[in-house]
Amino acid sequence: MYEQPLQDDPVAREKLLRARGEIEEIIKRYDLAAFVVLHAAPHGSEVLIEVSPSYSIVKIIDGVAHIKSQLADYKGDKDAQLYDLAASANMASSMFELMAHTTMLLGELAKQLDEITGSTHTNMKHIKPN
């Protein structure tokens, strides 16, 4: 079995942070919601969750999802409020369904690769950017 020591790789970390920054710019430029997981060998990962494009009534603050939709925020335009409510519901539902399917697929892939390689994994740790 090949054992790879767990350590922070500054080159991989820098690559991930640069890529994340570019992806964030694209998401903002096109006013999109997104869930992106990036990985760089040997064991660097970066997660990007964006659920607050202009139409969204959702914000994530300190890891907690908040929903805000007051008619006053729409200057009394109920149709605009309903549009954002529906768009936000569609965003959350479609992202959830696609991530759930992908999670099942990747879970099976990881299980098979672990069996083939005899791999074991340690718990992930969160490293905040400098």
Image (spheres, rainbow, N blue to C red):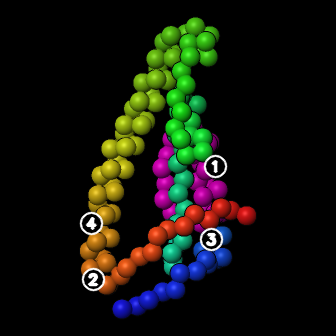
Amino acid type of the residue that numbered disc 1 sits on in the rendered structure: Glu
**Magenta stretch contains residue 111:** no
Give the quadrant of the C terminus: bottom right
The disc, 1 or 2, on the residue closer to the chain's N-terminal end is 1
Image position of 53 with respect to 23: above or below: above
**Mark 4 against mark 1, which lies toward the viewer?**
4
Kindly tell me whether residue 2 is visible in this rendering: yes
The stretch in magenta equals 16-38
> Could you give the CA–CA distance between mark 1 and mark 2, rounded to whole angstroms?
39 Å
Crowdedness of circle 3 by 10 Å Cα count: few (<14), some, many (20+)? Answer: many
Q: Residue at x 28, y 72 (%)?
A: 111
Q: How far apart in space, not on screen, are marks 1 and 3 (Cα)?
A: 19 Å
Asked if the stretch drawn in magenta spans residue 35, the answer is: yes
**Whether residue 94 is situated above or below residue 83 in the rendered picture:** below
Name the residue rendered at 46%, 70% in the picture: 123
| Residue 29: quadrant of the picture | top right
- Give me the disc on residue 25: 1
Three-letter residue code for mark 2: Ile
Q: Residue placed farthest to the bottom in the image? A: 1
Residue 46, picture quadrant: bottom right
In front of the other: label 1 or label 3? Answer: 3
Q: Mark 2, residues whose alpha carbon is within 10 Å: few (<14), some, or many (≥20)?
A: few
In the rendering, which numbered label is found on residue 116? 2
Which residue corresponds to mark 4?
108
The residue lying toward the viewer, choosing from 14 and 100, is: 100
The CA span between labels 3 and 2 is: 28 Å
**Residue at image point 48% right, 59% down:** 37
**In the image, which disc is placed on residue 78?**
none
Q: Is residue 39 left or right of residue 23?
A: left
Q: Residue at x 49, y 46 (%)?
A: 34
Q: Position of residue 41 (x, y in %)?
A: 51, 77
Type of the residue with mark 4: Glu
